[in-house]
Image: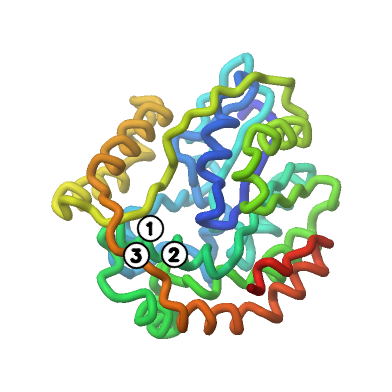
């Protein structure tokens, strides 16, 4: 495989990484894989990530070996970089080392979001895809049991928001000059500036991106569960489909369908659950704040 410089958007899930990925994918120097999330470096033995046994888990792409991973990239002469935006890599216990062994000079991009809001957004994402049938409170109460049963990392709603150890793993392996951390709350307020910063950080040439108004991964309730289930089934074969049809096209089509098939729903985060999560995350937020040298006090309120 032609040697390209590597850019990894490792997470966190539900922190704007999809929008960032598709914007960067417009850059002519950047080679994107046929699926946004190959999940190759987090697909290891004894990892907390990997194929799951929960509802809808079978539709997640898990790349099995390096040959298959490289096969996801259609490299052209203009390409000097390739990108992998698998959000499982931040939560994974082993992905940081696996990525380092693959390319110790890789550029690592991490986006962190208020963990309470992240967990709530991820739950709504599962509801939208007709995977979660229970309440948010019950999903949180069932989390430990589901982890023991081997449900996919997407069901680790509370655990995924404990960032300090996750970020620390990347600090242990990579030169901090090769790691850039963004806060979701700041990034969404000035996405063009954030994309320009990533472009400069990664070493890509200056580029005028087209910023679309359509949201990615919008949450809500499906109008038709049958149609939503059909799309999820198709999503399970996207690694194969996108070898024939450009991934940007299939993504736009699926986003348009999901937007049309999604209604707002009566979603309100219960105040009691919110307070419980804030207490749960308090110490880790303080540790993460010290680790990345950023003020995260607004996450505590």
Tell me the residue at 62%/38% (across/down): 191
Image-quadrant location for residue 249: top left
User: Going by the image, does 273 lie left or right of 289?
Assistant: left
Q: For the residues marked 3 and 1, what is the alpha-carbon distance in whole angstroms?
A: 12 Å
The residue tagged 3 is 267
Which of the two labelled residues, at mark 3 and mark 2, occupies the earlier sequence position? 2
Graded by Cα atoms within 10 Å as few (under 14), some (14 to 19) or many (20 or more), the crowding at tag 2 reads many
Asked if residue 253 is positioned above or below residue 46 in the image, the reply reads above
Which of the two labelled residues, at mark 2 and mark 1, occupies the earlier sequence position? 1
Q: For the residues marked 2 and 1, what is the alpha-carbon distance in whole angstroms?
A: 10 Å
Instruction: Determine whether label 2 and label 1 are within 8 Å by CB.
Output: yes
Q: Which of pointers 3 and 2 indicates the residue nearer the eye?
A: 3
Which of the two labelled residues, at mark 3 and mark 1, occupies the earlier sequence position? 1
Residue 259 coordinates in the image, percent (x, y): 30, 41
Residue 130 coordinates in the image, percent (x, y): 25, 60
Tell me the residue at 38%/66% (across/down): 52
Q: Which of pointers 2 and 1 indicates the residue nearer the eye?
A: 1
Q: Nearer the viewer, residue 60 or 47?
A: 60
Q: Nearer the viewer, residue 115 or 272?
A: 272
The residue tagged 2 is 154
Residue 47 visible here: no
Image quarter where the C terminus lies is bottom right
Element type at mark 3 = loop
Asked if residue 248 is positioned above or below residue 125 in the image, the reply reads above
Residue 238 coordinates in the image, percent (x, y): 34, 40
User: Going by the image, does 208 lie left or right of 151?
Assistant: right
Image-quadrant location for residue 250: top left
């Amino acid at each position: 495989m032609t040697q390209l410089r590597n850019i990894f958007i490792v997470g966190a899930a539900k922190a704007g990484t999809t929008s960032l990925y598709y914007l960067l994918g417009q850059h002519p120097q950047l080679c994107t894989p046929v699926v946004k999330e190959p999940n190759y470096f987090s697909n290891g033995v004894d990892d907390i990530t990997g194929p799951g046994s929960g509802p809808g888990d079978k539709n997640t792409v898990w790349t099995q070996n390096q040959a298959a991973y490289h096969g996801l990239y259609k490299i052209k002469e203009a390409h000097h970089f390739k990108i992998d935006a698998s959000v499982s890599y931040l939560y994974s216990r082993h992905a940081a080392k696996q990525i380092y062994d693959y390319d110790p000079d890789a550029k690592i991009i991490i986006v962190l979001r208020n963990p309470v809001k992240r967990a709530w957004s991820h739950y709504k994402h599962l509801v939208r895809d007709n995977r979660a049938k229970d309440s948010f409170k019950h999903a949180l109460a069932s989390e430990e049991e589901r982890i023991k049963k081997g449900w996919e990392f997407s069901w680790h709603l509370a655990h995924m928001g404990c960032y300090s150890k996750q970020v620390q793993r990347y600090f242990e392996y990579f030169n901090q000059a090769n790691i850039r951390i963004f806060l979701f709350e700041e990034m969404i307020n000035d996405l063009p500036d954030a994309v320009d910063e990533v472009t400069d950080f990664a070493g890509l040439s200056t580029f005028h991106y087209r910023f679309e108004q359509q949201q990615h991964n919008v949450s809500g309730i499906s109008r038709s569960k049958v149609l939503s289930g059909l799309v999820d089934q198709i999503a399970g074969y996207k690694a194969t489909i996108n070898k024939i049809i450009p991934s940007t096209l299939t993504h736009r089509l699926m986003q348009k369908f999901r937007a049309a098939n999604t209604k707002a729903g009566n979603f309100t985060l219960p105040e009691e659950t919110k307070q419980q999560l804030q207490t749960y995350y308090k110490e880790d937020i303080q540790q993460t704040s010290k680790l990345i040298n950023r003020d995260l006090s607004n996450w505590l309120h």
